[in-house]
Image (cartoon, helix red, strand yellow):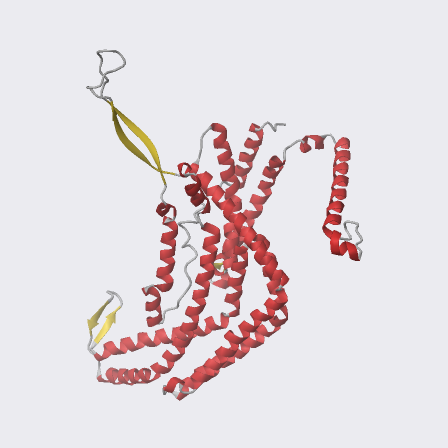
């Protein structure tokens, strides 16, 4: 308010704030226009620049935007040695969302200029037209929802910060500590191995207390984190959901560590017990031919194998109980990831524009051609002149059949089926039984609806913009 040169009294604050702000902005706008006019009189070259329409200036700004998007994409896809060759896009949902937006920055101007050039030549490109405006509509809706969601988070960041931290402390720390202490005894009447049970429980409790020490300083920044997430709503609701997903990953990192340790131990124990079971049958696995062959073992080998098999069999219930506990926690967290991923897919790739065209004007969404034959005329009918007959003529009527809703949602049905098979199919059950690590769905599963293809290089992009400006009459 001070920058606008306004001094507000109590009455102004109550009734006239918006009106005085508008008046101050108008005054500043008039001063800016007078300053530009005076500057153009002194610099004749600026007169030509001010005559260029606004859309042309916006087109010229696309070149640095395209260069900046390329740099951001290179950073996101750069493989980090500290992450074993992984990139930021493969480990962060926010990086994946930024990757989508930067790819749109690189491809949207290209498709827009192609559509505009097609209109100039009289060549209509329906696929690019539908895809471009569908992305524009989705982005507009994403920003509108993000503004509302961000305004709510900004206005209630203190309460939301305390609420979120209370949930984190209750469900990821206190409940986890109580569960480990419960497992150290005889949970549900199961008589576990006391030595192994005490070792695993003490180790997990020590790691949990170390995690509490690490995240305790973040308690005072909880409201600030919610405030930052709220401000990200200006970039869309998808960015808010992405940041919340990454925040969930960071706050449940210790549960993932516990699950990885328990899964590795459980899986290794299953493999060893299976090998020892084959030893009792007088067989062994042939790793070269990938089959089970007969084998003659010595008495010492059979005795040693029997001792190891008996030992692992009595230790198996203890390992299984710890593994089952953290596997269930991992599945619940993956369900939260799947929910956030579903919302992101809906906001980024829902076919809103094709559905609206299909409902409003189906003819603009052609699907397939329909050919119908029609017969006109009869030898028994008389024509216009007396004594003449109408010829027998067959007409072929060509009509358009609009695209069916099933075809519009075909890619998305395949996408939901792939996600359901990963999170709710037999693969998840098999991973739980065998102790294999359960991971989220790969980041390339959206290739059916997220294929932006290739875009022109920066040099070709600049040449295309120069050609458009030249054809519109902006020569030297």
Residue 133 visible somewhere in the drawing: yes
- Left or right: where 441 falls relative to 13: left
**Image point 63% across, 33% down: which residue?**
53
**Image point 39% across, 51% down: which residue?**
412
Q: Quadrant of the C terminus?
A: top right
Give the tally of numbered discs: 0
- Looking at the image, is 391 positioned above or below residue 103? above
- Looking at the image, is 313 positioned above or below residue 372? below
- Left or right: where 248 falls relative to 224: left
**Image point 50% across, 43% down: which residue?**
107
**Closer to the camera, 29 or 120?**
29
**Closer to the camera, 408 or 382?**
382
Percent from the top left, x then y, of residue 276? 27, 78
Residue 199 visible somewhere in the drawing: no
Percent from the top left, x then y, of residue 368? 33, 37
- Looking at the image, is 241 positioned above or below residue 136? below
Residue 66 falls in which quadrant of the image? Answer: top right
């Amino acid at each position: 308010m001070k920058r606008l040169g306004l001094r507000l009294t109590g009455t102004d604050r109550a009734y006239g704030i918006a009106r005085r702000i508008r008046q101050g902005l108008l005054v500043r706008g008039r001063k800016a226009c007078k300053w530009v006019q005076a500057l153009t009189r002194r610099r004749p070259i600026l007169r030509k620049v001010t005559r260029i329409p606004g859309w042309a200036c916006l087109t010229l700004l696309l070149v640095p935007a395209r260069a900046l998007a390329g740099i951001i994409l290179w950073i996101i896809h750069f493989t980090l040695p500290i992450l074993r060759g992984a990139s930021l896009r493969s480990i962060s949902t926010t990086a994946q969302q930024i990757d989508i937006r930067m790819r749109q920055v690189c491809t949207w101007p290209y498709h827009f200029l192609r559509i505009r050039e097609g209109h100039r030549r009289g060549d209509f490109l329906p696929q690019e037209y539908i895809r471009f405006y569908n992305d524009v509509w989705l982005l507009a809706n994403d920003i509108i929802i993000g503004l509302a969601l961000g305004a709510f988070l900004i206005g209630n960041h203190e309460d939301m910060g305390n609420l979120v931290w209370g949930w984190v402390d209750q469900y990821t720390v206190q409940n986890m500590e109580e569960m480990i202490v419960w497992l150290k005894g005889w949970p549900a009447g199961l008589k576990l191995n006391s030595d192994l049970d005490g070792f695993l429980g003490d180790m997990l409790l020590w790691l949990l207390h170390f995690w509490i020490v690490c995240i305790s300083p973040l308690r005072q920044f909880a409201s600030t984190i919610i405030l930052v997430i709220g401000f990200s709503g200006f970039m869309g609701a998808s960015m808010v959901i992405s940041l919340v997903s990454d925040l969930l990953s960071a706050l449940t990192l210790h549960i993932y560590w516990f699950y990885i340790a328990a899964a590795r131990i459980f899986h290794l124990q299953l493999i060893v017990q299976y090998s020892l079971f084959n030893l009792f049958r007088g067989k062994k696995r042939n790793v070269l031919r990938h089959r089970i062959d007969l084998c003659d073992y010595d008495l010492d080998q059979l005795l040693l194998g029997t001792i190891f098999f008996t030992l692992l069999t009595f230790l198996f219930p203890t390992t299984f109980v710890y593994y089952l506990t953290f596997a269930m926690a991992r599945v619940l967290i993956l369900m939260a990831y799947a929910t956030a991923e579903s919302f992101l897919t809906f906001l980024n790739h829902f076919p809103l524009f094709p559905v609206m065209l299909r409902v409003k004007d189906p003819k603009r969404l052609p699907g397939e051609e329909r050919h119908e034959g029609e017969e006109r005329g009869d030898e028994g009918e008389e024509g216009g002149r007396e004594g003449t007959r109408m010829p027998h003529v067959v007409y072929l009527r060509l009509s358009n059949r609009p695209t069916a809703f099933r075809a519009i949602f075909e890619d998305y049905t395949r996408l939901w089926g792939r996600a359901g098979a990963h999170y709710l199919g037999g693969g998840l059950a098999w991973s739980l039984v065998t102790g294999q690590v359960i991971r989220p769905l790969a980041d390339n599963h959206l290739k059916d609806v997220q294929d932006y293809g290739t875009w022109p290089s920066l040099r070709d992009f600049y040449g295309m913009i120069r050609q458009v400006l030249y054809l519109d009459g902006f020569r030297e």
